[in-house]
Amino acid sequence: MPRYYFEDFKVGDAWVFGTWSLSKEEMLAFAREHDPQPIHADEAAAARTPFGGVIASGWQTTLRCIRMFVDGLMAETAGLASPGLDELRWHKPVRAGEVISARAEVIEVGESRSRPDRGRVHFLISGVDAGGEPVMSAKGFFFVARRPPAQP
């Protein structure tokens, strides 16, 4: 039984899901498999860039934050589906060992015009570094089921 239904979400609701960090080996392995750009996958080439070394793929940063959002909130929500993201930004590079906090905030709630059994909950999902600076942000929405009527 889900803990959260459409009626439970209000603009301004916010969660912090905890922190994560990546080792250089994790960053390199992910990049070699999924995003083999030199700044992510080649230590020597990355050292010659303005970054001065390997940085995490933005995709890896996003996936870590999304995983914590799903585990920390959506796993307990009567979520039906998401049609995708409206905006995805990588604000700052993430380096090995850097501690990132995964967060989410409700930025809009809307009724479904065509399906009265659900609504739309728009989230801002973000990763924030130890100094409070965002490293990534994603705006998107989920269809969330309404609470079923109480059974006698």
Image (spheres, rainbow, N blue to C red):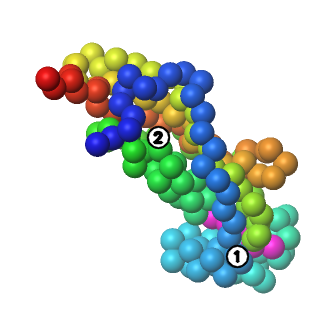
Quadrant of the image occupied by residue 103: top right
Looking at the image, residue 7 sits to the left or right of residue 34; the answer is left
**In front of the other: 60 or 16:** 16
**Frontmost residue, 46 versus 3:** 3
Disc 1 is placed on an element classified as loop
Tell whether position 33 is magenta: no
Can you identify the residue that label 2 sits on?
Answer: 85
Report the residue at 78% width, 83% height from top. 44
Question: How would you classify the magenta stretch by its main secondary structure?
Answer: loop
Residue found 77% across the figure and 64% down from its top: 98
Q: Is residue 31 left or right of residue 114?
A: right
The kind of residue tagged 1 is Ser
Q: Secondary structure at mark 2?
A: strand
Q: Is residue 141 above or below residue 31?
A: above
Specify the segment rendered in magenta.
53-58
Vertical placement of 73 versus 5: above or below?
A: below
Point out the image quarter for the C terminus. top left
Report crowding for label 1: few under 14, some 14 to 19, many 20 or more residues within 10 A (C-alpha).
Answer: few
Q: Percent from the top left, x then y, of residue 91?
A: 72, 47
Residue 69: which numbered mark, if any?
none
Q: Is residue 119 left or right of residue 88?
A: left
Which of the two labelled residues, at mark 2 and mark 1, occupies the earlier sequence position? 1
Q: Circle 2: is it few (<14), some (14-19), or many (20+) Cα within 10 Å?
A: some
Question: What type is the residue that disc 2 sits on?
Answer: Leu
Task: Check disc 1 and report the residue beneath it.
Answer: 23
Farthest residue, direction front: 152
Residue at x 58%, y 80% (from the top left corner): 29
Q: Is residue 95 above or below residue 43?
A: above
Q: In the rendered view, does 5 fall on the left or right side of 128?
A: left
Question: In the picture, which quadrant includes the N terminus?
Answer: top left
Q: Residue furthest left?
A: 152
